[in-house]
Image (cartoon, helix red, strand yellow):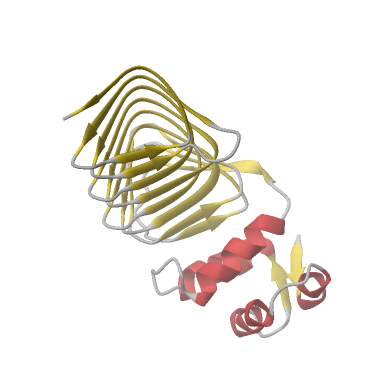
Amino acid sequence: MKVTIKWMKELNASEDDLATFEECIPTGEADQLFVLNKCAELSTNHFCDKFARLAEWLISFLPLTACPLVIKKFSGTTLFYPGSVTVKKDIKIGSSFFIGGELKADRKIIIDGGCIRAKNIKASEIINKNGGKIFGNIETEKINNNRGIIWAIKEIKAQEIINKNMGTIHGGIKADKIINNGGYIRSGNDAVIKAREIIHKNSGIIGGCIEADQISTQ
């Protein structure tokens, strides 16, 4: 599919996004993957820069690409793709990783100050630290959220969740064990936090609808 100024205007793109698109693509039109790759090339490796914002907007409107992207090893810092992505090894993200479908890692996902946006995120373990941000549903064995933000579209499924140092988690949760060490967790509207055991430490806060077999404070 080609991205054009006309198409963007029909979808009420902001003046800022239109200007950024013209900066990326002076001809005013280009294939969707070319545009997203150009945004990744020009991005300053900060998830809030104008090229990352344009890519995020485009991915929200572009049709989902049927062909998933399979990467043996992710060595870059920025990726924008309008479909699903599978990575065969650990992923370490320090910038923007925005995709339109599912992100699957055969091993760990480590977000170190960067940002992931995907419909669904699956990995053996997720480590989010140093202000990292995750937006999407999550399915994993373990989450370690250290001063990061996790915002589920609907639900987070994990065996163990450790949320510490003012880390924030928002959304429905199904977990065996939650350790909230000075962090903030909230279920959100029409969502439930379900766990066998919840442990509070250092004034950690959990709000919303909670169902737990055991809740303790240490």
Number of numbered callouts drawn = 0
Left or right of 27 on screen, residue 39 = left
Left or right of 98 on screen, residue 165 = left
Q: Is residue 11 above or below residue 17?
A: above
Q: In this orientation, which residue lies closer to the viewer: 83 or 202?
A: 202
Q: Is residue 59 above or below residue 217?
A: below
Q: Is residue 215 above or below residue 71?
A: above
Most extreme residue toward the left is: 218
- Residue name at image x 59 percent, y 41 percent: 68
Residue 3, x across and y down, in percent? 74, 68
Q: Which part of the image, by quadrant, shows the N terminus?
A: bottom right
Left or right of 201 on screen, residue 112 = right
Residue 28, x across and y down, in percent? 73, 81
Residue 70, x across and y down, in percent? 50, 41
Q: Which part of the image, by quadrant, shows the C terminus?
A: top left
- Residue name at image x 64 percent, y 77 percent: 17
Q: In this orientation, which residue lies closer to the viewer: 175 or 215?
A: 215
Q: In this orientation, which residue lies closer to the viewer: 139 or 79?
A: 139
Query: Which quadrant of the structure image shows residue 200?
Result: top left
